[in-house]
Image (cartoon, rainbow, N blue to C red):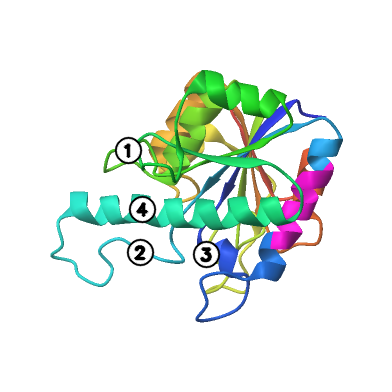
Amino acid sequence: MYKRIILKLSGEALAGDKAGVMYDDDTIFSVVEQIKEILDMGTQVALVIGGGNIWRGRSSNENMDRTKADQIGMLATVMNAVYVADAFRQKGVKAFVQTPIIIGTVTEQFSKETAEKHLENGEVVIFAAGIGHPFFSTDTVTALRGAELKADILLFAKNVDGVYDSDPKANPEAKKIEEIKCEDIIRQGLRVVDTSAASLCFEQKIQVLIFGLNEENSLMRAVKGEKIGTKVIVG
């Protein structure tokens, strides 16, 4: 059993399998209930949430300034974090949103010490707004917070149940990869996790698991160490 985990949820995952919606409460409450059980087992949980259900960078306007596009993306993650934090509240779990930029009374400003106190008190911390600067993905901030907080493992929950040798949506013959070396992700430029995140995980020897959020009790199974998704070998 892990002492401290950081869960990365893609923004798209918050919509479940429903088209045209930003949030699917059934999916979100399923995650919250699993995390509540994990907290009861004594494991500390922090989250990083993407913003892809709201904003997809310059996909709608390729001439947009990259910095401005990334800033909008940061704000999208804040919206998602606040929404999910309230879902925790509805289930009786205290959750705090921390951002590296000051957003009035909406969030706490990130502090390693404060985050650790929340975690040690059995409270959930949700990290939003990335690192506060453009050109860094939510994968990268997941790895960064994992290194800062000495997380035992990073759990990347996606819409696909692991890493495949080709796009399983386009290729029905695609084969799932059970284990992959972190350096192979970097060397081959695989779009599994951001290469900056992969480099940091490799350097700091942080365990990584990539799995499908929509599988039944997938998060609980991942925390219990069951065989699920794709394990990233870091050393």
Along the viewing direction, whichever of 192 and 98 lies nearer the viewer: 98
Give the residue at mark 3.
Answer: 12
Q: How crowded is the residue under tag 4: few (<14 C-alpha within 10 Å), some, or many (20+)?
A: some
The residue pinned by badge 2 equals: 56
User: Which dot, 1 or 2, sits closer to the camera?
Assistant: 1
Image position of 143 (left or right of 156)? left
Dominant secondary structure of the magenta stretch? helix
Q: Residue at x 61, y 22 (%)?
A: 116
Residue sitting at the far bottom = 20
The residue located at (46%, 29%) in the rendering is 144
Q: The C terminus lies in which quarter of the figure?
A: top right
Q: Is the residue marked by circle 3 packed among few (<14), some (14-19), or many (20+) residues within 10 Å?
A: many
Of the residues shown, which amino acid type is indicated by label 4?
Leu
Query: Residue 26: image x %, image y %?
Result: 71, 69
Q: Which residues are magenta?
A: 29-37
Depth-wise, is mark 1 or mark 3 nearer the camera?
A: 1
**Mark 1 Cα within 10 Å, few/some/many (few <14, many 20+)?**
some
Name the residue beneath numbered marker 1. Answer: 132
| For residue 146, above or below residue 187 | above
Type of the residue with mark 2: Arg
- Residue 75, label in figure: 4
